């Protein structure tokens, strides 16, 4: 079973970077599911928690570089939420390491690929989320 | 000012002589011998000795209890009472007993917050503040009335004092607050330890401008420092303390093994300096856990021998 | 408003451990405003509980709801249908709400998810501080509308203690000295003469010291 990784990407930067990664044929694991949000500030804590409740092994939030958020502070709010949830996920027993925040510009396709690779690697290293009970096999990107 | 209570401290101050008081910290135990030993070190060298009351909110033998033991060794105590641990019922009750046991001097304090002590989870009281406490005790003594207004046939005979911090904030307000304590009835004042003589002198100017030095006896607080580290700690970490760099440098510059001697010299210099300031009626020496230094300090500052103007009540009762 | 903090998750799990079906109910008033027990917090806590209990092998069923207010019977009684279907109620309201629910559903286990602390105000994003002590005898007219009973650590009434330094309370650099603030306000209002008067001992019988308070308006009682 492949690791389930969910990525909340902001329209203006991270999603564009992901797009560019595809165009440039940069490899990143195919099991990363991208959800486009207008801004990472829209990524409610509940979206992130639901992703884990629904079986995600790792989740990341990708937004603009700090200081360059299209909506000014949305990525800073997302950063605080991710910090809060990492602690909560540790207490819950899922593990805060399964959640992370990344920042990138629309041109940084390589950075998006790195983030996707890193979170997939974490999902494999930490094993399936304790909310799932199946084995994982790495699936190479197409 | 006429004699009201007749304690040794009151008589010395009233006579115009420069008074000397010191401090005795009761033990964190039920051992009376600790008090007796400290009292023997101090008896005869000072006019009266403050017996601290759960200082820094650390539980110690009570001030009244330890004061009684000290009195039996020939020392005249100044009982301390904070507002932190007792409500007005307990305070009045304890003061009736203190007077009945022969204790004659009282210092009224607000009290450090219990957070600093060894029982930070306790409930605090602060039914009264120190100014209300001063007023209440004076009314008990002079009007023979309890705080609720009821009369009492025999009132506690206590010479009432309060503390003041010349270095607290806001600076402009400190002399006014002292005025409030004196208006409430404080008859003597002991200040926080002075290292910044110049700032203390400025505070005394404000105090004199309000005529307060004529309404209450002001004793300047001093304290010998043992080490350069202690000097630095007081300068950097203790809120409300003003320790000039010059003092820290003097301590740091002392020869090896000579820190204590330098600390005593620094203290003597401060005593000599504050003696010159108009309105200062005495010194209050706080040699915390260094009570044995007091006789030497008093002697080096030229304040020995001490006059004996009243016998402690307890000593007369001993064989 | 009333300020409260969430209990640690471990404590909430321990309190609810013997119940399999929970109603987690928040409140739209004070605890929403201080982000402790509103609809969002109900959802986040419920999610955390579901995940934690599932991982430990005791899956719980959680019903989520947020009342308009939990301190008035008319809104609390509305919970009846939901309460009938669960083993226990985990209330995310302040202590008042928890007790009101319990009073109207005396055969139900009603548990607190919050530690209620004080009556206070918002001083900046994410910060709420104690402001009123409910002493029952308000002296704000004499102190420039800054309360020393609530905001002075020792509830002093005649000016700052010796521990006041740089406008801060001796107990922590996070706590402003209320009397430094009062002094500054009274200076600005040119009312310093008031501070020179001696405030007498406070009548604490109107405060919690005198017993639980009760307010009655007889004209409203039919």
Image: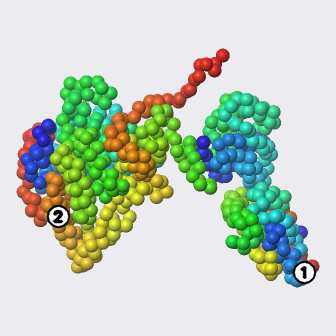
**Rendered location of residue C66, percent (x, y):** 75, 42
- Residue B286 in view of the camera: no
Which numbered marker is on residue B273?
A: 2
Question: How does the figure colour the protein chain or chains?
Answer: rainbow
Q: Residue furthest front?
A: C190
Query: B96 or A106, which is in the foreground?
Result: A106
Q: Please give left or right for residue B285 compared with residue B85 in the image.
A: left
**Rendered location of residue A22, percent (x, y):** 89, 78
Question: Badge 2 local density, few (<14 within 10 Å), some, or many (20+)?
Answer: few
Residue occupying the point 68% across, 46% down: C32
Q: Is residue B318 above or below residue B195?
A: above
**Residue tagged by mark 1?**
A23
**Rendered location of residue B261, percent (x, y):** 19, 71
Total marks shown come to 2
Q: Please give left or right for residue A59 compared with residue B43 in the image.
A: right
Residue occupying the point 76% across, 75% down: A104
Q: Secondary structure at mark 2?
A: helix
Q: Is residue B253 above or below residue C214?
A: below
Which numbered marker is on residue B196?
A: none
Query: C41 or B242, which is in the foreground?
Result: B242
If the image is split into quadrants, where does the N terminus of chain B sit?
top left
Q: Please give left or right for residue C69 compared with residue B107 in the image.
A: right
Question: Badge 1 local density, few (<14 within 10 Å), some, or many (20+)?
Answer: few
Query: A126 or B210, which is in the foreground?
Result: B210
């Amino acid at each position: 079973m492949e690791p389930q990784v969910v990525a909340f990407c902001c329209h203006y930067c991270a999603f564009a970077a992901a797009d560019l990664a595809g165009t440039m044929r940069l490899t990143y694991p195919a099991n990363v599911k991208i959800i486009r949000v207008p801004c990472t500030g829209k990524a409610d804590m509940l979206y992130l928690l639901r992703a884990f409740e629904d079986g995600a092994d790792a989740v990341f939030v990708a937004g603009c570089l700090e200081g360059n958020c299209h909506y000014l502070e949305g990525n800073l709010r997302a950063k605080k939420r991710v910090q809060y949830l990492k602690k909560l996920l540790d207490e819950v027993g899922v593990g805060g390491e399964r959640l992370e925040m990344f920042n990138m510009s629309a041109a940084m396709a390589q950075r998006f690929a790195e983030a996707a690779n890193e979170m997939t690697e974490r999902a494999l290293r930490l094993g399936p989320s304790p909310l799932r009970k199946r084995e994982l096999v790495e699936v190479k990107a197409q | 000012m006429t004699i009201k209570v007749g304690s040794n401290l009151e008589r010395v101050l009233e006579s115009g002589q420069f008074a000397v008081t010191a401090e005795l910290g009761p033990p964190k135990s039920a051992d009376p011998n600790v008090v007796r030993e400290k009292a023997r070190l101090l008896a005869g060298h000072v006019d009266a000795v403050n017996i601290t009351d759960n200082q820094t909110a650390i539980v110690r033998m009570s001030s009244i209890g330890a004061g009684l033991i000290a009195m039996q060794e020939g020392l005249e105590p100044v009982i301390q009472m904070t507002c932190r641990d007792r409500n007005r019922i307990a305070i009045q009750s304890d003061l009736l007993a203190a007077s009945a046991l022969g204790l004659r001097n009282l210092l009224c304090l607000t009290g450090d917050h219990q957070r600093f002590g060894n029982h930070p989870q306790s409930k605090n009281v602060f039914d009264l503040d120190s100014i209300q406490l001063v007023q209440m005790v004076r009314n008990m003594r002079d009007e023979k009335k309890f705080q609720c207004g009821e009369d009492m046939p025999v009132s506690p005979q206590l010479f009432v004092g309060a503390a003041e911090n010349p270095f607290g904030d806001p600076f402009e307000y400190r002399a006014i607050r002292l005025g409030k304590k004196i208006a409430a009835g404080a008859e003597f004042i002991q200040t926080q330890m002075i290292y910044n003589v110049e700032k203390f002198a400025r505070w005394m100017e404000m105090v004199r401008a309000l005529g307060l030095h004529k309404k209450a006896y002001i004793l300047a607080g001093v304290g010998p420092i043992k080490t350069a580290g202690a000097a630095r700690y007081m300068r950097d970490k203790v809120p409300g303390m003003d320790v000039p760099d010059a003092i820290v440098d003097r301590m740091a510059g002392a020869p090896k093994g000579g820190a204590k001697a330098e600390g005593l010299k620094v203290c003597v210099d401060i005593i000599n300096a504050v003696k010159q300031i108009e309105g200062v009626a005495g010194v209050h020496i706080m040699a915390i856990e260094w009570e044995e230094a007091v006789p030497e300090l008093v002697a080096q500052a030229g304040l020995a021998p001490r006059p004996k103007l009243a016998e402690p009540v307890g000593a007369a009762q001993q064989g | 408003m009333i300020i409260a903090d969430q209990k640690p998750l471990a404590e909430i799990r321990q309190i609810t451990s013997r119940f399999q079906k929970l109603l987690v109910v928040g409140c739209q008033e004070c605890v929403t405003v201080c982000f402790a027990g509103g609809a969002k917090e109900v959802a986040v806590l419920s999610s955390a509980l579901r995940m934690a209990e599932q991982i430990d092998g005791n899956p719980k069923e959680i019903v989520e709801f947020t009342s308009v207010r939990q301190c008035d019977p008319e809104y609390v009684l509305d919970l009846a249908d939901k309460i009938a279907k669960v083993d226990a109620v985990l209330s995310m309201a302040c202590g008042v709400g928890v007790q009101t629910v319990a009073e109207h559903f005396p055969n139900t286990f009603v548990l607190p998810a919050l530690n209620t602390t004080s009556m206070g105000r918002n001083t900046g994003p994410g910060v709420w501080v104690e402001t009123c002590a409910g002493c029952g005898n308000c002296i704000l007219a004499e102190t420039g509308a800054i309360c020393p009973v609530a905001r002075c650590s020792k509830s002093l009434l005649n000016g700052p203690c010796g521990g006041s330094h740089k406008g801060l309370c001796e107990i922590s650099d996070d706590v402003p000295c209320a009397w430094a603030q009062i002094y500054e306000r009274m200076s600005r209002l040119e009312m310093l003469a008031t501070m020179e008067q001696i405030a007498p001992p406070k009548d604490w019988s109107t405060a919690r010291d005198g017993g639980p308070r009760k307010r009655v308006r007889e004209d409203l009682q039919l």
